[in-house]
Image (cartoon, grey):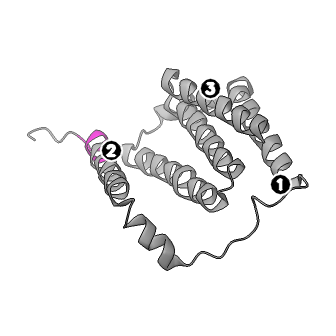
Amino acid sequence: MNVIFYLAGLVAIVATLMVITRVNAVHALLYLVVSLLAVALIFLSLGAPFVAALEVITYAGAIMVLFVFVMMMLNLGPQSEQQERQWLKPRLWRGPALLAVILAVELAYLLLRQNRLALAPVSISPQEVGLALFGPYLLGVEIASLLLLAGLVASYHLGREDRGGS
Protein backbone atom coordinates (compact mmCIF):
# COMPACT_ATOMS: atom_id res chain seq x y z
CA MET A 1 0.00 0.00 0.00
CA ASN A 2 2.88 2.40 0.73
CA VAL A 3 4.29 1.77 -2.75
CA ILE A 4 0.98 2.76 -4.34
CA PHE A 5 0.78 5.89 -2.18
CA TYR A 6 4.31 7.04 -3.00
CA LEU A 7 4.06 6.16 -6.69
CA ALA A 8 0.77 8.06 -7.02
CA GLY A 9 2.36 10.96 -5.13
CA LEU A 10 5.31 10.94 -7.53
CA VAL A 11 2.95 10.94 -10.52
CA ALA A 12 1.02 13.84 -8.98
CA ILE A 13 4.21 15.84 -8.43
CA VAL A 14 5.58 15.18 -11.93
CA ALA A 15 2.24 15.96 -13.56
CA THR A 16 1.90 19.18 -11.55
CA LEU A 17 5.40 20.27 -12.56
CA MET A 18 4.46 19.59 -16.17
CA VAL A 19 1.34 21.75 -15.73
CA ILE A 20 3.49 24.63 -14.54
CA THR A 21 6.12 24.31 -17.25
CA ARG A 22 3.91 23.76 -20.35
CA VAL A 23 3.41 26.70 -22.67
CA ASN A 24 0.43 25.17 -24.46
CA ALA A 25 -2.76 25.42 -22.40
CA VAL A 26 -4.21 22.16 -23.72
CA HIS A 27 -1.10 20.20 -22.74
CA ALA A 28 -1.10 21.81 -19.32
CA LEU A 29 -4.75 20.83 -18.89
CA LEU A 30 -4.00 17.20 -19.77
CA TYR A 31 -1.29 17.08 -17.14
CA LEU A 32 -3.60 18.80 -14.65
CA VAL A 33 -6.23 16.10 -15.14
CA VAL A 34 -3.56 13.42 -14.62
CA SER A 35 -2.44 15.19 -11.45
CA LEU A 36 -6.00 15.33 -10.11
CA LEU A 37 -6.52 11.64 -10.89
CA ALA A 38 -3.30 10.86 -9.03
CA VAL A 39 -4.55 12.76 -5.99
CA ALA A 40 -7.80 10.77 -6.19
CA LEU A 41 -5.77 7.56 -6.23
CA ILE A 42 -3.90 8.75 -3.15
CA PHE A 43 -7.22 9.25 -1.36
CA LEU A 44 -8.33 5.80 -2.48
CA SER A 45 -5.13 4.20 -1.19
CA LEU A 46 -5.67 5.93 2.17
CA GLY A 47 -9.10 4.33 2.49
CA ALA A 48 -11.26 7.29 1.49
CA PRO A 49 -13.17 6.12 -1.61
CA PHE A 50 -15.88 8.78 -1.23
CA VAL A 51 -13.32 11.59 -1.29
CA ALA A 52 -11.59 9.93 -4.25
CA ALA A 53 -14.87 9.82 -6.17
CA LEU A 54 -15.57 13.46 -5.31
CA GLU A 55 -12.07 14.37 -6.50
CA VAL A 56 -12.66 12.75 -9.87
CA ILE A 57 -16.21 14.02 -10.34
CA THR A 58 -15.76 17.54 -9.01
CA TYR A 59 -12.24 18.51 -9.94
CA ALA A 60 -11.25 16.40 -12.94
CA GLY A 61 -14.73 16.63 -14.47
CA ALA A 62 -15.42 20.25 -13.58
CA ILE A 63 -12.00 21.43 -14.74
CA MET A 64 -12.56 19.88 -18.15
CA VAL A 65 -16.02 21.45 -18.48
CA LEU A 66 -14.70 24.82 -17.34
CA PHE A 67 -11.86 24.63 -19.87
CA VAL A 68 -14.28 23.83 -22.69
CA PHE A 69 -16.50 26.70 -21.54
CA VAL A 70 -13.56 29.14 -21.61
CA MET A 71 -12.48 27.92 -25.04
CA MET A 72 -16.03 28.51 -26.31
CA MET A 73 -16.04 32.03 -24.85
CA LEU A 74 -12.68 32.83 -26.46
CA ASN A 75 -14.04 31.86 -29.91
CA LEU A 76 -10.62 31.46 -31.51
CA GLY A 77 -11.76 31.12 -35.14
CA PRO A 78 -10.12 29.50 -38.18
CA GLN A 79 -6.49 30.15 -37.15
CA SER A 80 -6.95 27.70 -34.29
CA GLU A 81 -7.48 24.78 -36.71
CA GLN A 82 -3.79 24.70 -37.64
CA GLN A 83 -2.82 24.86 -33.96
CA GLU A 84 -5.23 22.02 -33.18
CA ARG A 85 -3.59 19.87 -35.85
CA GLN A 86 -0.26 20.38 -34.06
CA TRP A 87 -1.84 19.42 -30.71
CA LEU A 88 -3.05 16.10 -32.08
CA LYS A 89 0.42 14.75 -32.88
CA PRO A 90 0.93 11.43 -31.07
CA ARG A 91 4.36 12.37 -29.68
CA LEU A 92 2.79 15.17 -27.63
CA TRP A 93 0.45 12.72 -25.88
CA ARG A 94 3.17 10.35 -24.67
CA GLY A 95 3.79 12.10 -21.34
CA PRO A 96 0.18 12.30 -20.16
CA ALA A 97 -0.50 8.81 -21.51
CA LEU A 98 2.46 7.30 -19.63
CA LEU A 99 1.42 8.90 -16.34
CA ALA A 100 -2.20 7.82 -16.89
CA VAL A 101 -1.10 4.22 -17.52
CA ILE A 102 0.87 4.23 -14.26
CA LEU A 103 -2.25 5.45 -12.43
CA ALA A 104 -4.42 2.82 -14.14
CA VAL A 105 -2.06 0.02 -13.07
CA GLU A 106 -2.07 1.32 -9.49
CA LEU A 107 -5.86 1.52 -9.47
CA ALA A 108 -6.18 -2.01 -10.85
CA TYR A 109 -3.82 -3.26 -8.15
CA LEU A 110 -5.82 -1.54 -5.42
CA LEU A 111 -9.11 -2.90 -6.69
CA LEU A 112 -7.87 -6.46 -7.22
CA ARG A 113 -5.85 -6.99 -4.05
CA GLN A 114 -7.00 -9.48 -1.45
CA ASN A 115 -7.48 -7.11 1.49
CA ARG A 116 -10.53 -5.01 0.66
CA LEU A 117 -11.16 -3.61 4.11
CA ALA A 118 -10.22 -0.10 3.01
CA LEU A 119 -12.77 -0.21 0.17
CA ALA A 120 -15.60 -1.74 2.19
CA PRO A 121 -18.85 0.14 1.55
CA VAL A 122 -19.80 2.44 4.38
CA SER A 123 -23.20 4.08 4.49
CA ILE A 124 -22.85 7.86 4.75
CA SER A 125 -26.00 9.93 4.51
CA PRO A 126 -26.11 13.21 2.59
CA GLN A 127 -26.92 14.91 5.88
CA GLU A 128 -23.59 13.74 7.36
CA VAL A 129 -21.72 15.06 4.31
CA GLY A 130 -23.53 18.40 4.55
CA LEU A 131 -22.83 18.70 8.27
CA ALA A 132 -19.15 17.95 7.68
CA LEU A 133 -18.83 20.42 4.80
CA PHE A 134 -20.64 23.24 6.55
CA GLY A 135 -19.34 22.43 10.01
CA PRO A 136 -15.60 22.00 10.56
CA TYR A 137 -14.78 22.51 6.85
CA LEU A 138 -16.84 25.67 6.30
CA LEU A 139 -13.81 27.89 5.73
CA GLY A 140 -12.42 25.53 3.07
CA VAL A 141 -15.76 25.35 1.26
CA GLU A 142 -16.10 29.14 1.24
CA ILE A 143 -12.53 29.65 0.01
CA ALA A 144 -13.08 27.11 -2.78
CA SER A 145 -16.29 28.86 -3.83
CA LEU A 146 -14.53 32.25 -3.93
CA LEU A 147 -11.68 30.75 -5.96
CA LEU A 148 -14.14 29.28 -8.48
CA LEU A 149 -15.99 32.59 -8.71
CA ALA A 150 -12.73 34.47 -9.29
CA GLY A 151 -11.79 32.01 -12.03
CA LEU A 152 -15.16 32.47 -13.72
CA VAL A 153 -14.92 36.27 -13.62
CA ALA A 154 -11.34 36.19 -14.88
CA SER A 155 -12.21 33.84 -17.76
CA TYR A 156 -15.07 36.15 -18.77
CA HIS A 157 -12.81 39.20 -18.81
CA LEU A 158 -10.07 37.40 -20.70
CA GLY A 159 -12.50 36.03 -23.27
CA ARG A 160 -14.64 39.06 -24.01
CA GLU A 161 -14.27 41.09 -27.16
CA ASP A 162 -12.74 44.56 -27.04
CA ARG A 163 -15.53 46.84 -28.26
CA GLY A 164 -13.53 49.95 -28.86
CA GLY A 165 -14.71 52.58 -26.38
CA SER A 166 -14.88 50.45 -23.23
Q: Nearer the viewer, residue 1 or 68?
A: 1
Residue 132 appears in the figure:
yes
Residue 88 appears in the figure:
no
The residue located at (91%, 55%) in the rendering is: 114
Secondary element type, mark 3: helix
Nearer to us of marks 1 and 3 is 1
Examine the structure image and report whether residue 159 is included in the region drawn in magenta: yes
Secondary element type, mark 1: helix
Q: Name the residue under label 2.
A: 155
Query: Where's residue 111, x and y in %?
Result: 83, 54
Secondary element type, mark 2: helix
Q: Is the magenta stretch mostly helix, strand or loop?
A: helix
As shown in the figure, which amino acid type bears the numbered disc 3? Val
The quarter of the displayed image where residue 96 is located: top right
- How many other residues sit within 10 Å of disc 2, few (<14), some (14-19) or many (≥20)? some
- How many other residues sit within 10 Å of disc 1, few (<14), some (14-19) or many (≥20)? some
Query: Where's residue 116, x and y in %?
Result: 83, 59
As shown in the figure, which amino acid type bears the numbered disc 2? Ser
The residue located at (37%, 67%) in the rendering is: 134
The numbered mark, 2 or 3, whose residue comes first in the sequence reads 3
Q: Quadrant of the C terminus?
A: top left
The numbered mark, 1 or 2, whose residue comes first in the sequence reads 1
Nearer to us of marks 2 and 3 is 3
Q: Name the residue under label 3.
A: 14
Which residue occupies the extreme right position in the image?
A: 114
Above or below residue 145? Residue 88 is above
Task: For marks 1 and 3, give the CA distance.
Answer: 24 Å
Q: Give me the disc on residue 93.
A: none
The residues colored magenta run 155-161
Task: For marks 2 and 3, give the CA distance.
Answer: 26 Å
Task: For marks 1 and 2, give the CA distance.
Answer: 38 Å
